[in-house]
Image (cartoon, rainbow, N blue to C red):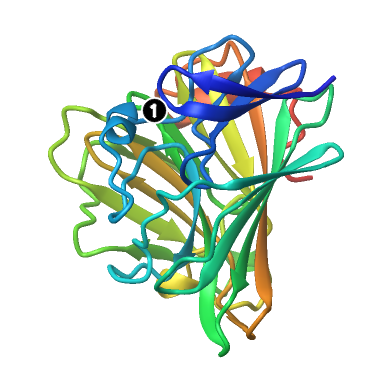
Amino acid sequence: MCSMSEVVDKNWGRSVRLANTSIELLVPLSFGPRIIHASCLGEKNLLGEFPEQYQKMDPSRWQSFGGHRLWHGPEDWTRTYEPDGAPIQVVELGDTTRFVQLPESQTQMQKELDVYLPPEEPQVQVTHRLYNRNVWDVTLCAWAITVMAPGGKAILPLPPRGLHEDNLTSQTTLTLWAYTDLSDPRYTWGKQFILLQQDPAATTPQKIGLNRSGGWMAYVNQGQAFIKTSAFVENATYPDQGSSVELYTDPNILEMETMGPMVTIPAGGMTELQETWYLAKQVPDPVDEQAVLHKVLPACGHLPFLPG
């Protein structure tokens, strides 16, 4: 059974709480749209959140707040960081709840999130939409960013491995930023997975991207796992040297990011990016690749996120 109720949260004020028999979400109504809380029922929030920013909210400038958000890329200081401090509209559509932002004043793009919780499953389906409210075409991509709470570790699977004689052409690309340091100890480079630790004691940011991954990525923190999936579009053009998934971390957060293809949206048109989230409890921390294979994946084995 799913429930939707309006609550007054101690940190975020007037909000919508969504829950089924396994998980719960919280969406503030005074800014966004943002999903600020996601956890197994009754457990700690897996998403990073900064309520102190809400207490000092300035609608004239962009603030992180944390949680899960929708941006449009590629990243640009002027366009991407449009403030989202205005109240949002809530629309009930049967089993789906829609959260709608007013069109951005500078870009005239409008963001919308549809959130659906299957009644008996530990999963969430999030549909992200960007509407072009300009009177001209706009070229961009939908960009879904999930800010994770500090102290955990991200798991980014590589595409299925193979033999040299059967794979003469390249399979994916690894994208680096000018500040990416492949010797940083927060990375664990494996044969099947790349792991990235969120370390509050770190002093520098890190970021990587992949064109084609294993179809999902996960974050494990204090016994809970957050897994999200999105589709890869063959022969599409992706931003950031072709990245469809990205990981970013700094001393405060870790972000798991999925990118939609670059598209030209006509006036009045829209683009859409869908994610499915899976949450699990009693998942051990992934110390290394072997721990992912022999401990994390078996603990999540009841979840249908693995391709095939």
Q: Which residue is mark 1?
A: 149
Q: Secondary structure at mark 1?
A: loop
Residue farthest left in this picture: 203
Q: Position of residue 96 (x, y in %)?
A: 79, 41
Q: Is residue 161 above or below residue 106?
A: above
Q: Position of residue 178 (x, y in %)?
A: 20, 64
Say if residue 165 shows up in the picture: yes
Left or right: 292 in relation to 297: left
Residue at 20 percent across and 52 percent down: it is: 181
Residue at 16 percent across and 44 percent down: it is: 204
Q: Nearer the viewer, residue 147 or 220?
A: 147
Left or right: 141 in relation to 197: right
Give the quarter of the image for residue 300. Answer: top right
Residue farthest bottom in this picture: 136
**Quadrant of the drawing holding the N terminus:** top right
Q: Is residue 121 above or below residue 160?
A: above
Give the class, few, some or many, for how many residues have Cα within 10 Å of label 1's Cα (few <14, many ≥20): many
Residue at 36 percent across and 67 percent down: it is: 75
Q: Is residue 77 above or below residue 21?
A: below
